Structures are given as structure tokens and as C-alpha cells.
Amino acid sequence: MAAARRADLRLALIAGALALALAPAAHAGQVRVDVGPSSEYSTRVVNVNLGDQVVWVWTGTLMHTVTSGDSLTMTPDLTFNSDPSFLGQGSFTRYAWKSSVLGTVLYFCAIHGPDMASRIIVTDPISGPPVPVSDFRITEVQYNRASGQDLIEITNFGAATGNLGRYRINVSGTGTGTELPTSNVVVPSMGRVVVHLNVSGASTNTDVYIPSFVPGTGLPNSAGALALYVPNSIAPGNALTNGDMLIDYVEWGAGSQANEGVAAGDFFWIPGTFVPLVAAGHSIKYCPDVLLSHDVGRWVDLTTPSFGSPGLCTTPVPTRTQTWGSVKTIYRR
């Protein structure tokens, strides 16, 4: 009986490994559209790949909506809508949609249509050349600095310039995340942005300052996680449990940290895996492969942090897991 149970477990682990191995790569590029400052969107046409997020950031004081549908007849089609009441939202509104259908998606402002209108053209990156978009990833974390003055590096691995303004980070799994406190952080392809926690300063396109982020602690020092989300200020879409808004994740010290289930559902993380803790003064660095894999094995221990540069990425951190190591062993056999 015990042997049969072990055989069943072995088969289940193999099936799980195969499912993860055959799962489609999690594509999560991003394209930014400004709403306003007057009665227009910043572009009439947005080109994205299936699975990319379109991010809208309101830049003026006028009331606007982002409503999918025919602008000529002002008829919504329910694909997305920033304001179902059609009254519009004003300054500091953020909204995002993860593209889930191929073809042309029309949208308009319910207040200023039909003149204020645009369209999204969604193509399949598998059947044709991918559309150049930004692709933001967490690439370095130093969570053990004194007074919680921790550092986070975010890199644009996409082929196009992107805008990191108003993106959200979270470590607790509660609330809706902490926004980067500026609407414009323009990042070229392969550009890097360093986020400084619990430090005041004038934010630029390479350095962003969050003066108050869990003051005195910053990122968790022993076991913790960091999640990166696209901008969204509208409930319920801005919930941390909304996997369509998550674009990257890393955890250290122990498995089962905040937001792990959401990341696993997006194939951004394998449950129970984590980057081992590193010594004070060290950082953990993401070393990408050609597929930009979301994988604990891509993270390394840097004795000398390299924020703002690629770093050496030569010393792999030994992977510690609850079950995944045995799954990989079985799968290789």
C-alpha cells in the first residue's frame, strides 16, 4: 500500500513538472498611454502582443474614461471600462487592461467621445514578429540595509522605451501596493531604475525615491517577497490578487510568502521555492536567460551590489525548495 502511494505521488510530481514545463511563457509587456491633459489620448493607435498590458495614466484635471466600444455610436462593448457609471475620473487616476483578445479593440472617452477615441491592435507574438514593447522586471534587491534604506532595481528588458511612472510594489499582500511617486519615469530598452526606500530625493528617470516605506524596516530582512504591479487605482481591478496586473515577483528566506499564489497562477514563480538569505551588505541579482525565465534559479548572490548595471551574475545561489527539487530530479530521470 505504501509503495502504491509513493508511486502515485511520483506520477503526480512528474505530471506537475510536465505541466510547468509545457506551460506557455508568461508574456507581460507593457505600453503606456496618457489620458489628457486635455481632451485626447496620447496616441490614436496602440500596438501590443497578446498578453501585454495597456496602461493609462491621467495627466490633467479634466474628467475622462477609458471605455471599450464603438466611439461613433458611443456604445460600450464591455471588454474594459474604467468607469461603469460613465461620469469620468480626474487627476491621479490609473487604469490597466491585459490584452486577452486578438484583433482591433476600439475605445473612447464617454465624456468627450466620439472625438476622444483610440484603438488597440493586438497581435499574436507566436504567429508573427513580436511588437516592440517595454518589459519591466525586478532585477536586483538589497533587503538588509540599515534603517530600512533598501534598494530595488527594475530593468526594462523590452525592445521599446517604457514608462515606469506610478507602477506599484508590494511586500505585505495587503492593500493595493505602494506607487512610485511620480507619473513619468521614462526607461529605454535595457535601461535600469533604482528605487530608494525610506530616503528622500528628487526622482529622475534612473533613480526614484520613496521617503516612507515601512519606516525603519523597509523590505523584510529574514523572509519576504517583492511583487511588481502595473498602475491601477480603480477597484476591484487594483487588488493584489488580480494576476492580470502582476508583472514580476521574487521571494527570499522561505516559501509561501505574500502574493506567492498570485505569482504562481501567472507562472511567474514556483510555489515553495525561494532565494536563500544573503549576508548583510550583499544583494540578490536576477541573471536572465534568453527566455527571461521567471525562475528562482536565475537569482544570484552578489557580494558587491551592482545597482544601475548588469553586474557579473556568475555565482548561482543554491536553490532551496520544499518539493520542487525532488520534482526536477524525477523529471530528469
Image: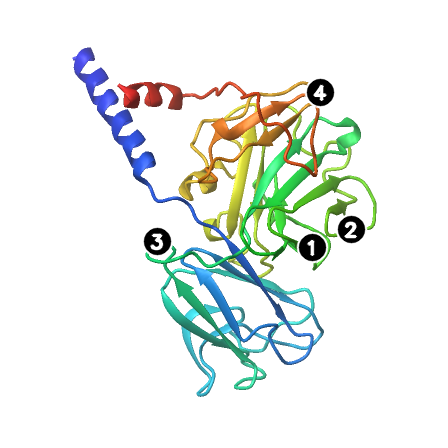
Specify whether 179 is left or right of 134. Answer: right
Disc 3 target residue: 126
Q: Position of residue 23 (x, y in %)?
A: 33, 41
Nearest to N terminus: mark 4 or mark 3: 3
Residue identified by numbered label 4:
280
Against 54, residue 277 (above or below) is above
Residue 18 is left or right of residue 77, and the answer is left
Q: Are marks 4 and 1 in contact (CB under 8 Å)?
A: no
Marking on residue 203: 2
Per the model, the C-alpha gap separating discs 1 and 2 is: 8 Å
Q: Secondary structure at mark 3?
A: loop
Circle 1 SS class: loop
Report if the CB atoms under discs 3 and 2 are less than 8 Å apart: no
What is the distance, in whole Å, between disc 3 and disc 2 at their CAs?
38 Å
> Farthest residue toward the front?
129
Is residue 258 in sight in this rendering? Answer: no
Out of 60 and 241, give the one closest to the viewer: 60
Distance Cα–Cα, label 4 vs label 3 = 43 Å
Q: What element does badge 4 sit on?
A: loop
How was the colour assigned to the protein in this rendering?
rainbow
Q: CA distance from mark 4 to mark 1?
A: 30 Å
Q: Residues within 10 Å of mark 4 (few under 14, many from 20)?
A: few
- Real-space Cα separation, disc 2 to disc 4, in angstroms: 26 Å
Judged from the image, the secondary structure of the residue bearing numbered disc 2 is loop
Mark 1 surroundings: few (<14), some (14-19) or many (≥20) residues within 10 A: many
The kind of residue on which mark 4 rests is Ala
The answer to whether any part of residue 164 appears in the image is: yes
Disc 2 marks which amino acid? Answer: Ser
Q: Dot 1 corresponds to which residue?
A: 185
